[in-house]
Structures are given as C-alpha cells and as structure tokens.
Amino acid sequence: MPVDLPFMADQPTASARIKVSPEHFKVDEVLGFEPDGTGQHYLFQILKINRNTADVARELSQMFGVRLVDVGYSGRKDKQAVARQWFSVPAQSVDAVSSSVGGPGWKVEKQCRHGRKLRRGSHRGNTFDIRLSGFKGCASDLEQRVLDLQCRGFPNYFGSQRFGHQGGNIDEARRILGTDAVRLRRPSHQMLLSAARSWLFNIVLGQRLLENTWTKALPGDIMMLAGSRSHFTAEKGDSMLPERLASLDIHVSGPLWGDVKAVQDQPAWQRECCWLEGEAEIRDSVARTGANPARRALRATFDDLTLNWTHDSNPRLVFTLGRGCYATSLLRELVLLDLP
C-alpha cells in the first residue's frame, strides 16, 4: 500500500519485523461451515509452507488431471507463512488416485466430500498467529494500542501484497486497463483490475481518515452491517447511527470502483469520485471495464485477540479476521513494520 496512507491515530513508535521465518507467520483458514460428507467434490485441507496458493492449485489440477478452473479455493494465503487452507477438486477425479496427496512444501491433512466447489469468499475468515521479531519499543504502549483497536476497530486497508512488489501491479494496471479492456478475461488482467480497485479504495479510506470521518456517517453515506455485505443509505436525522457505529454494529463503507453510471447520482459515490480526481485516469479506466461497483467497509474488527510475550521479549499476536481483511493492516497500527 502507499507508504503515506494515514494511521487511525498517531503513528506507532515501536518497530518490529514479520515473517523472519515461515513459523513466525501462521494462518489457519476458518471455513465457517461443516463439509457435507457427500457430494460431487472433495475438500482437501492443505498445510503449505512457503508456497503460493495459486501454485498449489496448479499442482492439484495436474495431479488429478482436471482443468485449473475446476480447482476451487476460498482465498489466497500468504506465501511466506505456514498456512492451512481448503481446496476443492471434482470427486470423480479423486476416486481414481491414491489417497496420498502432496507436493513440494505442501501436504493434505484432512479430506472429505462436499456438495459444492469452493469459491472466492466462501470462507468466514482466517486465524493468525504472528510473532513480531526484533521488537523495539514500549511494551505498555503496544498493549494500550491493542486495547484501543479492540474498542474502535482499525482501518480496513487492502494490504501491500495486493499491489505487487513495489506497487508494480498498479503500474501495470495503468498500462493494461487504459488500452484493452477486452483482455481482462485473462486471469492475470483480472488480478490487475482487482489491484486497481483496491488502490482506489485505499485512497478514499485515507481521505476519510484525514478528515476524521471514517467512523462517522456523512449525509448519504452507504453503511454496511458488521460481518455482512448488506448495506443501507444513511438518512439525515437518524439518531441511532452514532450509537450503532460506536458499538461496531455498522460501518461506513467505501467504493470498489466500477461502471458507476447507475449510482453516480448518489451522494456517497459523488463525493468519492471527487476524492479520486488525482487518480482520474485509473478510476475511469476501471469504470470502462464494465466491472460492477460494490462496497467494502472502511473499518475492520477482529475476534479473540491475545498478546503474549515470548522468552526473548518479542510480542506474539493471535487473532481472527473476517474474509478480505489483512493482518498487515492491523499490525501497521501497532508497530512500524519491516516487511520482507
């Protein structure tokens, strides 16, 4: 993400490193449902270490002799990590091979039948177990920051991994989206479109943080129910909005840009269009792709966060985030991160 995006409060004074080794960054996918036990697909819970989700999916497709698009998963997980996540493969292919499945840097821990292919966003969230190495700072200040985030939530920025090395995906998106939208049928170009929409969202969220309105409803704002994609428009004089925002029951939303012709007269989209004038080229290129506009909460929350101190006085954080939320966006509010 751009290094100058605002923080929710003062910039942290403590610093630390993450992902010094894969074991220092653990991710467990939370499906949020029980597999059927029967059906036309096999679900595999896979433990992977230093492996990309897309690469494991490709190896599964080759192993079972199915098309890559027939291999399902709910979301991409960090490569530099110890990560558990679920994949799905058509059952008729699995029946014909040995039950022993694995590859370099990954192995199957559980498998069962299920009625549906896994699709993006079909999981509930992810549980993280992260060690902050080389911690330099005040322990009590870190503990207070954790308490503040529990009460207030944190800015729901898309993480820097969304934008590629040194933001290279955004540079490529400017070039591709501005030339030939038809080519967006390619998976690589769909990824660039997603990166561009994430970039624009981060800019709007940053503006709301600068104006201290990211947790306040402006006239015509589109509000999202916590833990849901359901949304409604803030009405003038609704006295319940401040209380519901303070209790984390609802959140102000920001734009996932697209073809906004159908919504461009709404106050929220009008404001956001103005805030994105500095990125008008990529904003308008995204609109020309015909992507459906959508909303994303400006604020994220977490569950069951614990902060422990290891034998060498480095912090260890364990917490659960909803789907689509980035652990690095939480961590940046706690410490200055030295990212690998």
Image (spheres, rainbow, N blue to C red):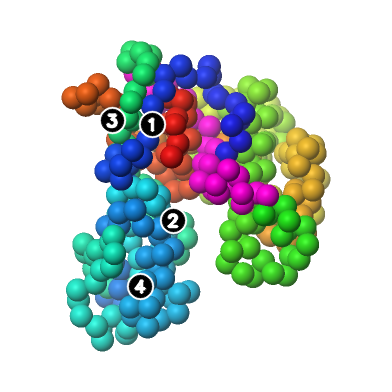
Q: CA distance from mark 1 to mark 2?
A: 22 Å
Earlier residue among tags 1 and 2 = 1
- The label number, if any, that marks residue 17 in the structure image: 1
Whole-number angstrom distance, CA of label 4 to CA of label 1: 33 Å
Asked if residue 72 is positioned above or below residue 143 in the image, the reply reads below
Structural distance between the alpha carbons of marks 3 and 1: 12 Å
Query: Of callouts 3 and 2, which one flags the residue occurring earlier in the amino acid sequence?
Result: 2
**In this view of the protein, can residue 247 be seen by the observer?**
no
Residue depicted at x 37% and y 71%: 59
Q: From the viewer's perspective, tell me whether residue 53 is left or right of residue 305.
A: right
For this rendering, which residue is in front, 91 or 54?
54
Q: Which residues are magenta?
A: 143-171
Residue wearing tag 2: 76
What is the CA distance from the residue labelled 4 to the residue labelled 3?
A: 33 Å
- Sequence order check: which comes first, mark 4 or mark 2? 4
As shown in the figure, which amino acid type bears the numbered disc 2?
Arg
Location of residue 232 in the rendering, given as x and y in whole percent from the top left corner? 62, 43
The disc, 4 or 1, on the residue closer to the chain's N-terminal end is 1
| Residue beneath disc 4 | 60
Residue 298 position within the rendered picture, expressed as x and y whole percent measured from the top left? 57, 36
